Image (spheres, helix red, strand yellow):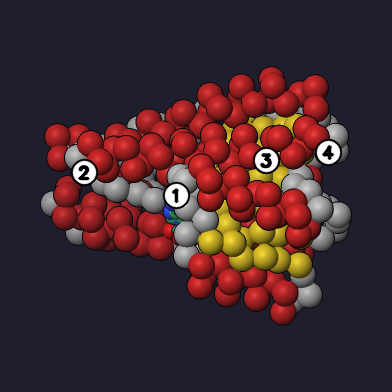
Amino acid sequence: MQLTGKVAFVTGAASGLGKQIAHLYSQEGAKVVIADLNQGAADATASEIKAAGGSALGVAVDVTDEAQVEAAVDRTVKEFGGVDILVSNAGIQIVHPIEEFSFAEWRKMLAIHLDAAFLTTRACMKHMIAAKRGGSLIYMGSVHSKEASVLKAPYVTAKHGLLGLARTMAKEGAKYNIRANVICPGFVRTPLVDKQIPEQAAALGISEADVIKNVMLKDTVDGEFTTVDDVARVALLFAAFPTNALTGQSLNVSHGWSMT
Ligand code: NAD
């Protein structure tokens, strides 16, 4: 049990990577807030965790909305007595060549990936600093924090931006023992990826099998997808690490797609 007594606020935790992280954190002893746009799915995930003997709370929140984020973090502190771990994970994908992106889509992508990281960080940092018990800020980056792919201009831009935020938070958080790190997964079969396989096939004029083999997994060492469990293990490492020795870092979990 590596997270006994800790409270984790995990965004986008009603599905995919965030959901697995929430389950693993609970198994390791943390109280977990499932913060997600999808209230029904957030409540369902919280119920699964409680049925397994853990403590969890589903909270409906749009992570791009300042007031909703503040209220959700305040509620976390009220119900669970503090917040020790932030996993800023909620995200979406929209794929187009740049000339077909509307400004509204560009803004939406940057809002979900970057505005939300700022809003959740600020809301959690305030409580972490006041409580004087340190903390861990974890951002869900991507191999696209380090590499670029066609059709993904706003996603790649936003995911690169998270590295800058995490490094700045590592410096600002150090005196409070608050660490900040980025997880950089390769492709994982979640609803986010399943949706883009046919979209990329249509945009690139190739089959869905070719998207998987020759686009998504082309540069891995073994042609394998990363799994939600692989990513949750890295999220546990960052959450449980005891000192500032591991801060301002980004860790690829991608079957060798990126080695930088
Ligand atoms: P997913 O679609 O399975 O889950 C995303 C969750 O985020 C959903 O539950 C959704 O309701 C929630 N969400 C979306 N917009 C929201 C908003 N405005 N406010 C609150 N919640 C919102 O996706 P996933 O694959 O688990 O992705 C999670 C994160 O991991 C994203 O940031 C994504 O960019 C990143 N990522 C995914 C992969 C992959 O291959 N799946 C790879 C690298 C990085």
Cα–Cα span, label 1 and label 4: 29 Å
Furthest-bottom residue in view? 51
- The residue sitting at 52% across, 56% down in the picture is 61
Label 1: few (<14), some (14–19) or many (≥20) C-alpha neighbours in 10 Å: many
Residue 124 - label: 3
- Residue 259 in percent (x, y) is at 52, 32
Q: CA distance from mark 2 to mark 1?
A: 17 Å
Q: Which of the marked residues, 1 or 3, is nearer the chain's N terminus?
A: 1
Mark 1 lies on a secondary structure that is: loop
The answer to whether the residue bearing label 1 lies less than 8 angstroms from the nearest atom of ligand 1 is yes
Q: Nearer the viewer, residue 240 or 114?
A: 114
Question: From the viewer's perspective, is the residue at label 2 or at label 3 nearer?
Answer: 3
- Compared with 225, 70 (above or below) is above
First of labels 1, 4 by sequence position: 1
Is residue 201 shown to the viewer in this render? yes
Q: Is mark 4 within 8 Å of ligand 1?
A: no
